[in-house]
Amino acid sequence: MLSFMTFRCADSLNRRVLLFLHGVGEAFDITKRSQPPQPRGLNHLFNHGVTWALSEQKNITEAGHPLTNPQFSIVAPQLPDRYTSWVIEEHLNQINSALNFVVEGAPIVYIVGFSKGGTAAIRLGQRISSTRAILSIDASAMDEKPADVAAELSECKIPFWMIYTNYTRTEDLASRITDMHELVKADPHKISDIAQPTAPPVNSRCKTLVDLWAKENQFDRHTELCKIVTTSAVPFQWLLQH
């Protein structure tokens, strides 16, 4: 069973909805099987990504960022624990119900996903008929074979922009993230300066590697990329062009 944070656009005729799918660290129960129980809570949902940006106005400073004055409704489900999959029929049904709850008429859906949610964004996006475009941030294959996940994501016909960073061979995230992205069949979209990114063409299926070697810890790179992408207006403006 999913929990939900929702926001309804003030314009009742606006049918656009942004769906945000979080990573493992934002679940209600983030306890690892090898660790003592950790505090549970809905507040985990606001650790990273779209929900983090919305939690405090100061988190987004770029003028004109779509999240500062959302011209769309927002649906942000929360998984019960870090191990439960996004991609099961019950969750799809609950998400579809939430999308239809926040707007009048058929929703027009844009999906943003981080880490575990980045992969799920593309998988679920293909099963939500009203999905227009997808933004995937440092998507992870988790415990699946990267080649198998990459092959599945490569089949997606919906416009998507996968943004990921680099990991060394000795780091856990190397195969889950770097290897998987390298195997996805999508057009490379290079960005020379992440502080001033350029968007890919509308309706493209592409991937972008962002160099974050300045961050020594792999998880710092992972979360920093999410922050960089979330606070930039360009990826969200690209989404809303579809």
Image (cartoon, helix red, strand yellow):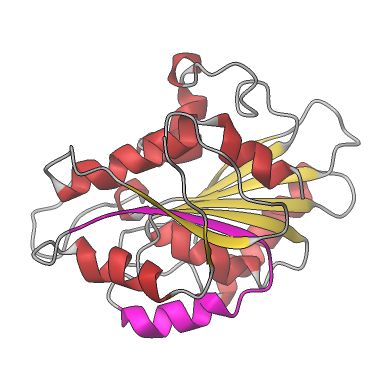
Q: Is residue 239 magenta?
A: no
Give the answer, above or below, for where 70 lies relative to 161: above
Does the image show residue 12? yes
For the residue pair 234 and 11, the one nearer the viewer reads as 234
Number of numbered discs overlaid on the protein picture: 0
Give the answer, above or below, for where 132 lies relative to 42: below
Bounds of the magenta span? 144-167
Residue under the point 36% across and 83% down: 147
Q: Position of residue 128 (x, y in %)?
A: 70, 67
For the residue pair 71 and 31, the one nearer the viewer reads as 71
For the residue pair 203 and 79, the one nearer the viewer reads as 203
Indicate the quadrant where residue 241 lies. Answer: top right
Give the answer, above or below, for where 173 lies relative to 242: below
Residue under the point 38% across and 35% down: 227
Q: Is residue 73 left or right of residue 10?
A: left
Give the answer, above or below, for where 222 lies relative to 180: above
Q: Residue furthest front?
A: 192
Q: Position of residue 25 (x, y in %)?
A: 29, 49
Q: Position of residue 184 (x, y in %)?
A: 46, 74
Residue under the point 26% across and 42% down: 212
Q: Is residue 197 left or right of residue 156?
A: left
Residue under the point 15% across and 65% down: 33
Does the image show residue 42? no
